[in-house]
Amino acid sequence: MSKAPFNIQDQYLNQSRKEHVKVKVRMMSGESLEGHIKSFDNFSVLLDSGGDILIYKHAIATITSVNGNFRLHHHQ
């Protein structure tokens, strides 16, 4: 059996996208953005924040749910 190459970053972004969780993205610069994850790939995250914002992952420090209640499900 081969394991799917699905990492924790992909799990977190995908689950929060599917569940339409409002997230706070804190940038390395200290700036924070709030919105919903619309899409992502290996290098960037598309955030819907009243308009689409393309954020490069290397510029992100942390991502958390705005209400603090988001929990990552264990992968199956």
Image (spheres, rainbow, N blue to C red):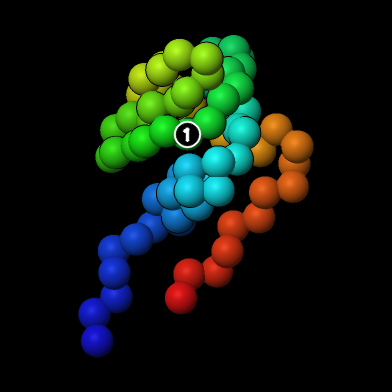
Identify residue type, mark 1.
Ile
Apparent side of residue 43 relative to residue 66 in the rendered image (left or right):
left
Residue 5: image location, x then y, percent: 29, 63
Q: Residue at x 46, y 76 (%)?
A: 76
Q: Please report the residue visible at 24 percent of the width from the left and 86 percent of the height from the top.
A: 1
Q: Residue 46: x percent and y percent?
A: 39, 27
Q: Residues within 10 Å of mark 1 (few under 14, many from 20)?
A: many
Q: Taking the image as drawn, is residue 19 in sight?
A: yes
In this view of the protein, can residue 64 be seen by the observer? no
Helix, strand or loop for disc 1: strand
Residue at (59%, 57%) from the top-left corner? Answer: 72
Q: Is residue 73 above or below residue 34?
A: below
The quadrant holding residue 4 is bottom left
Could you tell me residue 37's position as x and y percent? Answer: 47, 34
The residue beneath circle 1 is: 37
Which residue is located at x 45 percent, y 55 percent?
A: 11
The tally of labels here is 1
